[in-house]
Amino acid sequence: MTKCKNEIVAPATHLGFQVGADRKLANWQQISSYFHRLAEHSDRILVEEIGKSTEGRPMLLATISSPGNLEKLDYYRSIQERLADPRDLDATEASELIQQGKTICLITCSIHATEVGAAQMSLELAYDMVSQTDEVTQEILDNVIFLLVPSLNPDGLDLVIKWYEASLDKSYEGMLLPELYQKYAGHDNNRDWFMATLTENRHVIEKIHNVWHPHIVQDQHQQNSEGPRFVLPPFIDPYDANVDPILRGMVNWLGMSIASEMNGRGFKGIVTNLTYDAFSPSRAYQHYHGGVRILSEVASVRMATPVKIDQLREVHGFDPRVATWNHPQPWQGGDWHLRDIIDYDKACAWACLRHAARYRDSWVANFYRIHKKAIEYQEAPYAFIIPLDQTDPATAAEMLGVLMLGGVEVQRAAEEFTYDGITYPVGSLIIPLNQPYGRYAKTLLEAQPYPDLRVYPGGPPRRPYDITAHSLPLQMGVKTIAVDRPLQLACQPVTSVPLAVAEPARFKPKPLGKQLLIDPRSNRAYKIAYQALQDGAIIGRTAAERVDFPAGSFLLQADSNTLAAIANECAKFAVEHQAADASLPMRQLQRVPRVGLYKGSIPNADEGWTRYVFDEYGIPYISLGDAEIRQGDALKQLDCLILPSAKVEAIAEGLPGDIFPREFSGGIGERGRDQIHRFVERGGTLIALDGACDWAIRQLWLPVQNVVAELSQTEFYVPGSFLRVLFQPDNPISYGLPRETNVVFLHSPAFDLGIGAQSIASYPLQNPLVAGWILGAEHLQGKSAIVEVTLGHGRVTLIGFRPQFRAQARGTYRVLFNAMLQSVLS
């Protein structure tokens, strides 16, 4: 059927209101149906579903280009594939492909769902691209394959709009949504681009990034209302050293080009070189895959409700009222509307696309040069060895899965070899760094040093935009060895992610007896034990070490068929297990722990990530809000209550009662505090994570002091680093953990103890830094990281870090699992 351009309707006709109108927002059904409508009537756009969101909504990719280009998409994809891996490409053929290739430009919208403008803007941008006939539009269509994702978070979009519409004409109109706008991660969803735990991010990586290898990714965001109007790269330092210098230059070039064009068109308040760095791959997948990732941040309104800005305010030392070299035209204040956001976002998108079209040859050629350098890499480290003698084989395999999702090639040694005096058997895993995505492997496998950056010489530390370390082996507890000279050995490619990284013998079920002993040093052991407990098995934890099985091993009693099935599951994931006799001393788990997870009215990503981990591991729990804590009845049905990391005020006070109704305000208050106190005294276990420890210490009058709470940033500063902690052996919370374990410390507490408090884990007497940045390490030396306090018949467990951080810190999951299981340990 011939598509008729006359039938292409404007977004306003489809929606029944103008895009950007005050207090009007298009929901996901309206947006997605409009894109499908455009595809029905235009030969410049193809729309496809790339998968379902976490809650089952379709995620869309719109591909926009000239009709001729759209007919040859497979051909242009093949060019990208060849240039991304030029190992069998000679210079002549590479030159020909560069001449024939198109710039691949991906624009993504509204991953943070309260930042509604970009998703709304996408309707107009797509309409303009398929309906306009001017020379600039045609140049873009001819030279660019434009990939547009109208929303990276359709679940959140609908949730936000539902909340916004319910808030209209109320005191909290357009204000904070009292729950996470992504089921598990909330605002953290754009910190997930290398781990890809979230369904939405995995779809985008698998179906867009890894298929098209974009030269440009332009990610549209919003920021606070009272600062500059629009922020663009160049990024500030530090850059991750593994980002190719060519890409750094291209980021600067593109960001300044967009800023220059927008300034020239009269858009005021455009600033570059502010706030945002390029250190972490958690927000910049494409920086390690041959392309640039630039973000834009436009000033917000109250969702779709206008704001009046009488006085702009300083942001991180930058005054938006003053003209500077990187901020030539300040905005003077006044009314600010959703329409303004859309105009700025659309102008940015057009400037980006014009640059992509005009400099097609540079984008394609530099993409090739970056990957040519990658395959010719010859520096130490030359490779990483992942040995088979892993303590937690399944988690090691999960790490491999992260790397292989990112295109990293893994090899298996076809012969025995020796490195640094250690002999490695056949089957040991090797990750060479002279490969197309070797820089990606390197940044995820090595320990990061972070520079000591100050606001001014001798002054306070300059805040990093995100955390200062991201090494997968360090936070997942996986053994790796950096190789400082070339390895010469026969290898075979690993073509699929294994279930576990282990010697072949560990994949065989062991002979059965009346009981089964399971080693707790792998996360998978806990998933198996939890499932067996729910299925009715009798499970205890051994009180002492036995041969190769440490204290805290799971001892299972069940019928022979059940034990055989559990042994097979252990073998499948290389979890150590063996038959055991009935005389083995142990403490029995009385039941599946009845777990309550506090979910306050202020959205908390740490709470969401905790739910994610529980859902992944099949751990049953209930969520308790402020009102349920204050009422107290639900606490009577629990064995343990978990307080995710949060500020004291967020837990105690919640949202302000003079703005929000009682159902969303007031926190747990004094009544909730008293209910928790009674819960613990009756025999319950309270587990406080990271920042929530301060609430427990203050509100329950615990004999514990947070020794870093009153220190200034010039005295003590750890903004997301990996630190070494020493665990006390044989304590139930230490079960399955090595004595030396790395933890994620993000403005976390550290403890001095009074009478009645017991230290479970502490920082060494030396500098505990393993990766990242620390100022004032001496304030941690010898201080406690995990503390237990008896209170009445129950206990309070203070875990002074985030053991489940972003579902990345898998080396410390067992801390939380053990604390929960301890609540039902006889």
Image (cartoon, grey):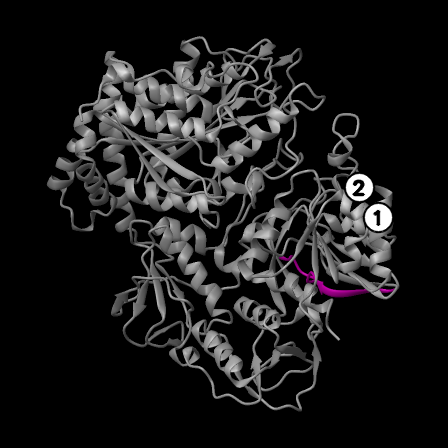
Horizontal relation, residue 216 to residue 368: left or right: right
Q: Is residue 480 visible?
A: no
> How far is the residue under mark 2 from the one under mark 1?
8 Å
Q: Quadrant of residue 53?
A: top left
Q: Amino acid at mark 2?
A: Ala
Residue depicted at 25% across the width and 29% down the height: 362
Q: Is residue 483 above or below residue 599?
A: below
Give the amino acid type for the residue marked by disc 1 in the picture. Arg
Question: On the image, which quarter does residue 475 sit in?
Answer: bottom right
User: Local crowd at mark 2 within 10 Å, few (<14), some, or many (≥20)?
Assistant: many
Mark 2 vs mark 1: which is more N-terminal?
A: 2
User: What secondary structure is marked by label 2?
Assistant: helix
Q: Residue 662 lies in magenta, yes or no? A: no
Q: Contact, CB < 8 Å: mark 2 with mark 1?
A: yes
- The quarter of the rendered structure image containing the C terminus is bottom right
Q: Within the magenta stretch, is there residue 762? A: yes
Residue 725: x %, y % from top left: 65, 62
Residue corresponding to mark 2: 652
Whether residue 669 is situated above or below residue 739 in the rendered picture: above
Q: Nearer the viewer, residue 249 or 794?
A: 794
